[in-house]
Image (cartoon, rainbow, N blue to C red):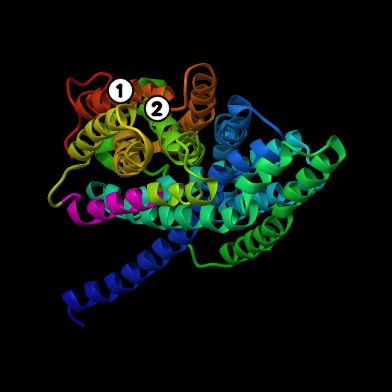
Amino acid sequence: MTKAATTASVAAPATTQQTRSIVIIGALFFIFGFVTWLNSVLIPYLRIACELNNFESYLVAFAFYISYLVMAIPSAWVLKKTGFKNGMSAGLLVMAVGALIFVPAALTRTYGLFLLGLFVQGTGLAVLQTAANPYITILGPRASAAKRISVMGICNKVAGALAPIALGAVALKDADALVKRLSSLDAASKAAELNALAARVVTPYLIMLAVLVLLAVLIYFSSLPEIDTDHEDETVAAANTNKTSIFQFPHLLLGALAMFFYVGVEVIAGDTIISYGASQGIALTTAKFFTACTMGAMTLGYLVGVVAIPKYLSQEKALQLFAVAGVVFALGALFTSGYTSVLFISLLGLANSLIFPAIWPLAIEGLGRFTKIGSSLLIMAIAGGAVLPPLYGWLADHFSPQQAYWLVIPCYLFILYYGLYGHKARQGTPAAQPR
């Protein structure tokens, strides 16, 4: 057998294994999206069922996303002990426990239990994200990492478009009529109606529980290979000889801050749009589809990434262009009204689409043996989704749901700074390492 033939025979199985791994990780990103974007329905749903104001209802996002801050470092420890594959399986089981907590929460209409269930689900997702994001980044050439993450983003956002429609059809069915009816009921009748409304989510979350357990078993017995992120090539190892901490990588720290702002604006765009549409006089029966529009816009952006990165558009340039688009669309939402304003909020999904795929590889570039802990820091930054949406809710209560969107403008401006300059910051080197 010739050397060329031998090389081809080795490369083919490797390519097949890589494709199989990408399909498995894609399925996980579908689950990420489905569970995450259920929050866009849970916020208006629980606002009615548990009689909440704007700020209180956005604690849904806080409980879900704060788990990333609390659990990211423990997640890295779990992955160090278990490896990527077993860690992903464990994360799915933790998410299943979170789904189970929704049952007593719904049956007792206890908002605190709903928040606990969301925190537990977020904990499971923290483990999964800590494993899956660096995994898909490293599973191929670094220059095309944003392209692979864009493929994952399509899986994530297709699920994100389906999730609110599926849950909304159950949880928000005839919600407008119910809200009008509640104002005319006595206390006992009102409690009975609200209890019935809360119970609507029991069956969907029991189904989610079964699916998550099944996926955990399938991942555990899958052929997903381990990747050694502690291994460094000679160039990276030499560059990191004197490095003892992730705090010696300024581009990572700035990337984590950019990620914090990005996740905050992404969650605001997806989770506030239903309630915002209602505040603009649009019926909930129509508004419940708006998150799907935001996810559709994100999917379109990811398709652009798959086609354009890195052939026509570098990761850095994509980050810059889409951050500018975020500012433009936010201003459009602020200075229009009705369906036009809602459309601009949906278009924030397009602006957000390539920000995450660009930030991640730029931030973990050159970390070598610090990749896992660096990834954990980026996962902790997902807590932006815990902090900014409740802040939006507070602003909406004190000013208006529309004027509260001024919050996203400085966030996009910092992301633009990271795309222009921040990702080049290197301790001990005058410029970014060549790609």
> Mark 1 — residue?
414
> Picture quarter containing residue 248?
top left
In magenta segment, residue 412: no
| Residue 242 visible in the shown view | no
Indicate whether residue 308 is drawn in magenta: yes
What type is the residue that disc 1 sits on?
A: Phe
Q: Which residue is mark 2?
A: 261
Rendered location of residue 98, percent (x, y): 69, 47
Disc 2 residue type? Phe
- Residue 111: x and y in percent read 73, 35
Secondary structure at badge 2 equals helix
Residue ranking furthest to the bottom: 1
Residue at 37 percent of width and 22 percent of height: 406
Q: Decide if residue 12 is on the left or right side of residue 176.
A: left
CA separation in Å, label 1 and label 2 = 8 Å
The range drawn in magenta is: 295-310
Q: Earlier in the sequence, mark 1 or mark 2?
A: 2
